[in-house]
Amino acid sequence: MLSVIAGALLFLGSLYGGVSIRHYYKTRARYFEELNNLCNLLIDEIIHLKTPLLKILKNFTSMKKDEFSKHTDAFAELLRREVLADRESVLKILDCAYLKKDERIIVADFFMILGRSHSDSQEANIKHYRNKFLEAGGKAEEAYRVKGNLAYKLGILLGIALMIIVA
Amino acid sequence: MERILKTLLRTGVYEAVSGSGRAPESLYEIRLRTGKPLVVCGKFGSGIVAKDGGLSIASKSRSVFEKTVSARGDNAAQNEAAAKNDGPDMTAAKDKSLTAAQKTLGFEPFIISAEDIEYTLGVASGHSVYAVSDKLVKGYISFCGIRIGVSGEGVTENGRLTAFKNINSLNVRIPHEVKGCAGGAARIVDEGPRNILVISPPGAGKTTLLRELTRLYSERAYCVLLIDERNEIAAVSDGGSLLDAGDFTDIISGAEKRLIYENVIRAMRPEMIVVDELFGRADADSVCDIIRSGVRVMASLHADGLDALRGTEFEKLKDVFDYFLILEKPGGKIAVIKKGDALF
């Protein structure tokens, strides 16, 4: 009986590991997808409607609870609180397991340019970063499909294997 | 106004401006220039603000800053200096280790950094410089009724100024409501709506007088339409007016006056239109058109007296306006000239 319970626990542990790894890749892919969505929204709102930045960010994150929306909300709060958001403070906001160090720097630089110049310059800068995010997002999506799903399947297989061995 | 200035200025700048118990809202202008001393202008003239909040008043006649020194906290000396200069308290830092700036000025001034400018610009634009770029091109932005003059490197395209970059200088102009400042000009209001042109060089109080006359007309139940292009007459913020322009006054703020004249005259049916700071032939032509349409106009114009209009696009205004109010300095006497007077 004890061995059955131990086998089941090992299976669940292994499954959890697989699910976690897949979640990591999925969150990364979703993060860059949302970044790309924000870039598109910013281009529309800034060029055509000249909507204030904080309003755009608020509209973007309303009803969302994903990792990128949390970062966006934290950045908006930083702007409201300190007005001059320095790079270090923005990098601190972006401190998470889902972004690599160089990606954090790029995202921080992207946030830093928002609202600081006239619309032509904003459009050019946002498009420049959007291209970077599209490229990174493509890689993250690929990693999710290949590595994430592989880790999930391996987690299940390893769990079954461990359960059989123990039981 | 204190709350607005506290929001608009970086903490260090606000503390320096309000140093020695000075009320920042009593000032006329706060000038921020990157790498240069913080300068404030008020009833006393212009003054450089010391790091500790003290102030030294400019003596233009000698092209040096006359030190009005008193140790901070020395009330008798401060009051004496204030009385001498007819202005707020003035102190200057006493520091034995003199820097280059100190050697020239006799005290260490508060130096404005690029971050101070960026902070104010960020707040005033709502972190959205792109949203105020149209105004920036015209050399100003507005924040809660405060007009902020801007200068930096202009970007031109096909001979047109399209943007400002590297903004290095801001002039925060604090609006003042002085009820009763119209003096002798107030009697014109008793005659009913008239075409009135307020003339003075910059900084003499045109806008303050215009606001007061608008309020007086409004008090007498005349329908006044205030076209507050630079949002400094009524200081509209979040739909509400921070300064009193009267209960019978409709306010359109932040829009270019030439773009709204025609539709507004039809839709709002005002008895009088009030506009600030006419500039260029197009403004002069528009005002003449409105007056021809039967609506009275009260406007202001930058000029050094009526003679300065001779030979300019504004000369024709002499024929259409009924009264000319000439201001020489803030709080000074208002010269009222009626069309057809001997002086005219």
Image: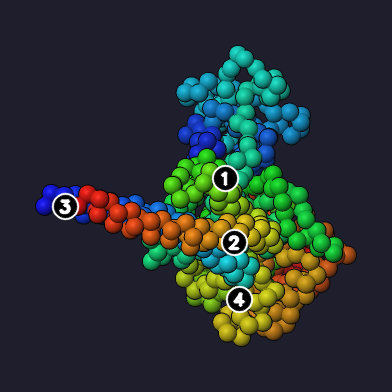
Residue B287 versus residue B107: which sits nearer the camera? B107
Disc number lying in front (4 or 1): 1
Q: Residue at x 58, y 49 (%)?
A: A106
Q: Which chain's residue wears label 4?
A: B
The residue labelled by disc 2 is A134
**Image quarter of residue A121:** bottom right
Separation of marks 3 and 2 at Cα, in angstroms:
46 Å
Mark 4 and mark 1 in contact? Answer it, CB < 8 Å.
Answer: no
Which residue does the numbered mark 3 point to in the structure image? A5
Asked if marks 2 and 1 touch (Cβ < 8 Å), the reply is no
Q: Chain of mark 1?
A: A
Residue A84: quadrant of the picture: top right
* Tag 4 and tag 2 share a subunit: no
Mark 2 belongs to chain: A
In depth, the one of A129 and B104 nearer the eye is A129
According to the picture, the residue beneath numbered tag 4 turns out to be B272
Q: Residue B84's spot in the image, x, y percent?
A: 59, 30
User: Mark 1 highlights which residue?
Assistant: A102
Residue B96 location (% of width, % of height) = 60, 13
Residue A31, horizontal then vertical, whole percent: 48, 58
- How far separated are the C-alphas under marks 4 and 2? 57 Å
Question: Is residue B76 something that shows in the picture?
Answer: no
Residue, x 43% and y 47% (percent of image)?
A97
Residue B317: image quadrant is bottom right
Q: Is residue B226 above or below residue B80?
A: below
Looking at marks 1 and 3 on the same chain, the residue that comes earlier in the sequence is marked by: 3
**Callouts 3 and 2 on one subunit:** yes
Q: Earlier in the sequence, mark 3 or mark 2?
A: 3
Dot 2 or dot 1: first in sequence order is 1
